Image (spheres, rainbow, N blue to C red):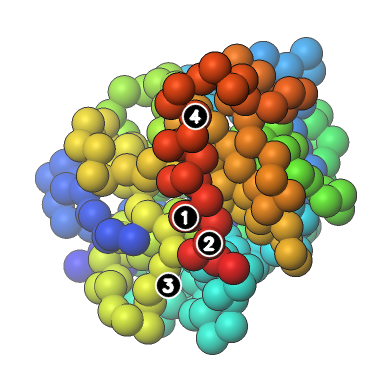
Amino acid sequence: MRIPLVIFIFFASFHSPAFAGDDERPNLVLILARDLTRGHLECYGGKHSSPNIDRLAKEGVRYETAWRMPDENLSKKTLFSGRYPSHHEKAPSLSALLEKSGYQNGGMNIDLEKSLSFLAQAQGTQPFFMIHFVGSEGAKVDHQVGKLLSAIEKNEFKKNTLVMLTSEGGSGKAKTDFEVRVPLIVRAPFLVGQGRVSKDLVDFTDILPTFLSLAKIAKTDALKSDGKSIVPSLTGSDDPFEKRNWIYSESGGFRMVRDWQHILDTEGNFHDLRSDPRQAKEVSPLDKQAPGRRTRLQMMLDRFL
């Protein structure tokens, strides 16, 4: 039986898709960029050329509302633990869990040549994961993504490899939806609807349960995550119970939560993101739905106080 491959490149219910023709687990590739914003990427309406990342989006799913944590260190810890910062203690390591389940560990690489060398030497009979970190310059990120995609395709891994690209954010303390919203693009062999733009809500706690689902690692109390697998989203599910209706971000004493329309933070700021995406003004007192929605969001914030 073939062993799955996972590659990480710095970039909960467990739901596993059925693969065409067999029951193999996919290779996993995570590309994690530092301080890469949506404005850097043409596929997100940015002014910079990003042909390789744009191709990834055309062959995958591009998420419109994906949240990181307010600073990069918390973003990484949240991504690899599947837990919000206030729950980081005693959280399992994603890399350790995948390696224990039989995945080859491709390492956490900053050097592009190391990642390319690993892909060239990887055996198709055994799955692997690798984490590759890239900088913040859009053109450099796009170049490295192109090299990695070419290596995956050259070694015939594309048909059984998930590639995920996202950004851990920068060193500043973000306090708005616009500041914590990052690019998230996923290409997968089981994907339904290439080139699709998803409005599903996602945050960094969702990545670990997604990978554990694909790796067929059973959910236990020890592996409890604050997030939810996005596999149903990738496979085109319309079931609202398989998706999130809120996402959350925190740093120190500052916390914020949003749903499909509104955002609330611990400083009392409450905004309607549809009419006021830059959060420049408070919700109108004439909005009759706002009080009930504010109450629900406050209940979510209170869970993490």
First reached walking from the N terminus: tag 3 or tag 4:
3
Is label 3 or label 4 in front?
Answer: 4
The answer to whether 20 is drawn above or below residue 111 in the figure is above
- The amino acid on which the numbered mark 1 sits, given as a three-letter code, is Met
- The amino acid on which the numbered mark 4 sits, given as a three-letter code, is Ala
Q: Are marks 1 and 2 in contact (CB under 8 Å)?
A: yes
User: Viewer-proximal residue, 82 or 282?
Assistant: 282
Q: Which residue is mark 1?
A: 299
At horizontal 52% and vertical 80% (from top left) the residue drawn is 91
Q: Which residue is mark 3?
A: 98
Q: Residue furthest left?
A: 21
Is label 1 or label 3 in front?
Answer: 1
How far is the residue under mark 1 from the one under mark 2? 5 Å
Q: Which residue is mark 4?
A: 290
Give the x, y percent position of residue 65: 54, 33
Is label 3 or label 2 in front?
Answer: 2
First reached walking from the N terminus: tag 3 or tag 2:
3
Q: Residues within 10 Å of mark 4 (few under 14, many from 20)?
A: some
- The amino acid on which the numbered mark 2 sits, given as a three-letter code, is Asp
Q: Which residue is mark 2?
A: 302
Give the x, y percent position of residue 2: 26, 64
The answer to whether 108 is drawn above or below residue 177 in the figure is below
